[in-house]
Amino acid sequence: MSELATIRWGILSTARIATKVADAIHATDGAEVTAVASRTSDRAAQWAAKHNVQRFYDDYQSLLTDEELDAIYIPLPPSMHAEWTIRCAEAGKHVLCEKPLAMNVSEAEEMAAACRENNVQLMDAVMWVHHPRATDMLKPIKDGSLGELRRVTTAFSFDIEPYLTTKPPHMAIDSETGQATVESVKQHELRFSKELGGGSLLDLGWYNVRVALWALSDLPRRVFAVARYRNDVDMNMNAMMWYDDERVVSFDCGYDMAHRKWFEVAGHVGSVVCDDFLVPWDLERPRFWRHEGVTSTEHVSASAVQEQCMVENLCNVIRSGELNTSWPQITVANQRVCDAVAQSARTGQIVEIH
């Protein structure tokens, strides 16, 4: 595999997000989308023709038996992630799986184990952590410039109600950008289906939790959360997470507030603030701020397409033949924390994480 010039990708479904990732794969040197699968032949054929894909299949399993494919991108509903990640691993395919990784941490652990046992890479599709800005922001957090870390605060929300009540039913919302896009109403059906893995915590809060894990490199010891539910699906979630060494994390996420996608990491000396961590408001000028005392300094990172950065990172691992063990570890940890937050919101109790 280390001699392979081009990493050949298959995409398991023609879901809306698949278009964004397929474009990124095509735009990445040494990567191509070679095949796509859908549950209907017509849909697969139309999608393949539109996105310059050589082959298409009318069932998911056939894609996995394509011996020319190296990696599979899975944009299926969360309820299907475990089954198809495990099947990909057993077929010897590396896996890029949409978030949330699974429905619960037991599934996530099974997925990670299957990939490990079959010597294939597992990565979740949290894109912002692969952008050069994430590396730039992490440096002062880790090198002691902020002093002893004390608090991480983050928010991710958008108001979904106008799109449900006043917009045409073919409007959907990109959960990373918060922008309306033309698509099937199925995107909203997923968000409001507990059985499919919907709800604001797994859709949006997954990113809030990742900020904490990224900044603090550890799991919290205890969590407490409250939520508002509609048809047994969380419309919003507010959580507190307590760490060792007097570190505290708080976050909120929801479908009932203005579009917000910011975080602050604060130490006893200074802080790092980013008001658009998921996707820069200005793609050509991805910036963040360093605060210390009464001084605020703006920093601008290199411009990059974060989807391409993610694809490139996974392709490089595949070529190297050396699996990155930290990616499956952090995504399983992400799932573990989300499980605890969900349990706390349901029970009204503080939940310990072991």
Image (cartoon, grey):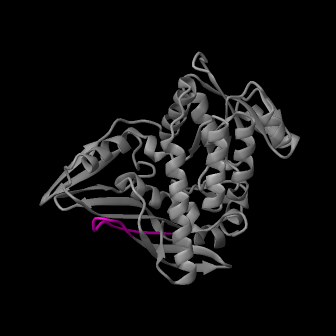
Seen at 60% across and 40% down, the residue is 21
Q: Residue 263 appears in which quarter of the rendering? A: bottom left
Count of numbered badges drawn on the protein? 0
Residue 255 visible within the image: no
Report the span colored magenta: 242-254
Q: Is 304 situated above or below 147?
A: above
Q: Is 255 situated above or below 269?
A: below
Q: Is 140 situated above or below 175?
A: above
Seen at 84% across and 36% down, the residue is 62
Query: Does residue 249 belong to the magenta stretch?
Result: yes
Where's residue 69, x and y in %?
72, 28
Query: Does residue 90 belong to the magenta stretch?
Result: no
Where's residue 254, x and y in %?
52, 70
Q: Residue 299 appears in which quarter of the rendering? A: top left
345 on left or right of 268: right
Nearer to me, 70 or 203? 70
Where's residue 70, x and y in %?
67, 29
Nearer to me, 298 or 253? 253
Seen at 30% across and 58% down, the residue is 265
